[in-house]
Image (spheres, grey):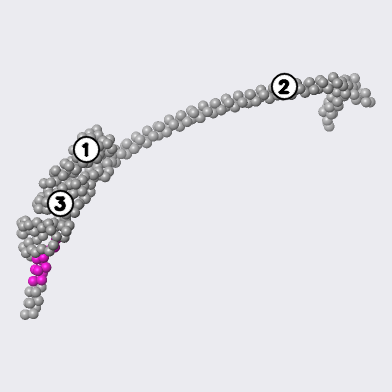
Amino acid sequence: MKPIAMIIGAVVLVLAYNSVFTVNMTQTALVLQLQEYQKTIHEPGLYFKIPIYQEVRYFTKQLLVNDEEPTEVITKDKKNLLIDSYSMWRITDPLLFFQTVHSERGGQARLDDIIKSELRVELGTHDLIDVVTITREAIMTKVATEVNVQSIKYGIEVLDVRIKRADLPPEIANSIFSRMRTERERIAKEYRSEGKEEATKIRAETDKERVILIAEAYKQEQIIRGDGDGKSTKIYANAFNKDRKFYSFMRSMQAYKQSFQSGTTILLSENSDFLEFLNKSR
């Protein structure tokens, strides 16, 4: 009898355990009886159910974030864009949500389809420049509003839809980057050409100024040298006029000194004027 009593006690404990469930403050619970809806529990606490005969489905009250897969759209000006977006949503009607999409995964999948569709429709009415700069905020507000209208029938409220990134498809991006690179290279060549032209002008101007400066310096040199030679000649003339014999003697001595260098041979007549003072001394 004792083993039977233990078995019965264990069964009773299992049934008692399975007849109790809790709902916390972040959850809403649906009680189903043979897959038929019985009631919705919104308040947190401890509740009872009929074991095996009834089951409980839980749905969160918290805000959910759905990160959609990137989708390709075409703008009004026929430009392809790869849009990476996310949405924030919550379950407002657990029963309707359960009846239509069954679970959070099903709800996310349904939202993905709605958001992608609305993005294609709305972005198709705007040019590329509007999407990435000017009216992006207004576009996303309108998309969020339209998505929320459609999601209400699934027991879902969409609070916001945002674009994380708006990129060109890889094949188009590579083509654009190639054109941009070619354009930048062309501009760089123009700058280099202009720089060389300007350098040539500066070099030519510098050479011109150098020639002018050298010519001016040579001119000043000749003027100064001419003045010096004139003063020197005047000094010599004054000295010669004061004592012509002595001046003639000194000039001859200087001439002898410069002429009779070591290893120098000079052939002159004995009556040469150049040897006048040597003849006199002899």
Q: What is the spatial separation of the Cα atoms under label 3 and label 1, in whole angstroms?
A: 27 Å
Direction right: furthest residue: 282
Image position of 25 with respect to 269: above or below: below
Q: Which element carries disc 1, helix, strand or loop?
A: helix
Q: Which residue is found at the position 16% from the left and 60% from the top?
A: 24
Mark 2 → mark 1, Cα distance in angstroms: 90 Å
Q: Quadrant of the C terminus?
A: top right
Question: Of the residues tagged 3 and 1, which is closer to the observer?
Answer: 3
Residue 226, numbered circle:
2
The correct choice, above or below, for 208 with respect to 133 in the image is above
Residue 271 rendering spot, x and y as whole percentages: 90, 19
Looking at the rendered image, the quarter that the N terminus falls into is bottom left
Please report whichever mark, 3 or 1, sits nearer to the chain's N-terminal start: 3
Tell which residue pokes out farthest to the bottom in this image. Answer: 1
**Percent coordinates x, y for residue 251 in the rendering:** 84, 24
Q: Which residue is mark 3?
A: 91
Write down the quadrant of residue 41 in the picture: bottom left
Judge whether residue 221 is colored magenta.
no
Label 2 Cα crowd, 10 Å radius (few <14 / some 14-19 / many 20+): few
Q: Are marks 2 and 1 in contact (CB under 8 Å)?
A: no
Q: Secondary structure at mark 2?
A: helix
Tag 3: residue type? Ile
From the viewer's perspective, is residue 20 above or below residue 84?
below
What range of the chain is rendered magenta? 11-23
Residue 90 got which mark?
A: none
Query: Mark 3–mark 2 contact, CB under 8 Å?
Result: no
Magenta part mainly helix, strand or loop? helix
| Residue designated by label 1 | 123
